[in-house]
Image: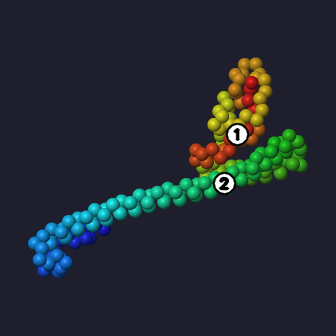
Amino acid sequence: MVDDLKDVSDLTNDEQSTAGDGNKGHACGGDVLREQNQQLRRQLDYLAADFDTFRRRAFVDCQAAASDARSKIFVDLLSLVDDFESALKEIEREARQDVAAHTQGFRLMYQTFSKMLERYGITQVATEGIFDPFVHEAVMQRPAPEGVVAGTILDVLQKGYRSNGTLLRPAKVVVAQ
C-alpha cells in the first residue's frame, strides 16, 4: 500500500511546480513536498501497523468468546453425562435379564456421547492419587485405610472435566484423612 504512493522525487518539474503552487516564489518548494511525502509515508506505516495489531487482537478476542460460549454449553451437558453414568450403575446393580437390552442401549448412548465430548476437546480430570485443590473439590473426608496416605482420593462422587486445558468443573471426591 505504501509502495503505491508516488515519491516527490519521481515527479517532473512541471508536476512539482503544479503540486507546489502554494509555494510559488520559494526555492525550496520541492524539499517541503519531499518532507511532507516522507511524513505521510511514516503515518501510513504506523496506521498499517496499528490496523494489523487491531485485526490480530479482534481475532483472538473472537476466538476467546467462541471458546467461552462453547464451554458454557458443555458445562450444562455434563449433567447429562452424570445422569447416564448413574442410570448405568443402577441398572448394573439390579442385573436382571429384562433390563439387559436397556443396559446395552444406555451404554451405547453413553459411549457415543463420551466420544463426542472428546472430539470437542472435553476430557475428564484425573482422579487417581493425591488430592489436587486446583482440579478436585473435597466433598468428604474418611479415615485413611491401612497403607493409604492421607490426602489420597478414595472415591469420586462426580467426575471433573476440562475443555482444552481449561477447568470446566472440578471433580468432587472423597479424601483420606
Q: Is residue 130 visible?
A: yes
Query: Along the horizontal axis of the image, is 19 left or right of 51?
Result: left
Percent position of residue 83, x then y: 79, 48
Percent position of residue 137, x then y: 71, 37
Q: Are marks 2 and 1 in contact (CB under 8 Å)?
A: no
Q: How is the image coloured?
A: rainbow
Q: Residues within 10 Å of mark 1 (few under 14, many from 20)?
A: many
Percent position of residue 52, x then y: 39, 60
Q: Is residue 9 visible?
A: no
Sequence-wise first label, 2 or 1: 2
Helix, strand or loop under label 1 = strand
Query: Which amino acid lies under the numbered mark 1 shown in the image of this protein?
Result: Ala
Give the farthest residue toward the top.
Answer: 146
Query: Along the horizontal axis of the image, is 168 left or right of 56?
Result: right
The residue sitting at 53% across, 59% down in the picture is: 62
As measured in the structure, the alpha-carbon distance from the residue carrying label 2 to the one carrying label 1 is 17 Å
The residue sitting at 71% across, 41% down in the picture is: 159
- Compared to residue 114, the image places residue 170 above or below, namely above
- Kindly identify which residue carries mark 2: 72
Query: Which amino acid lies under the numbered mark 2 shown in the image of this protein?
Result: Lys
- Kindly identify which residue carries mark 1: 171
Percent position of residue 132, x then y: 65, 33
The residue sitting at 89% across, 49% down in the picture is: 98
Using the image as rendered, state which of residue 17 and residue 91 is in the foreground: 17
The C terminus: image quadrant: top right
The residue sitting at 23% across, 68% down in the picture is: 36
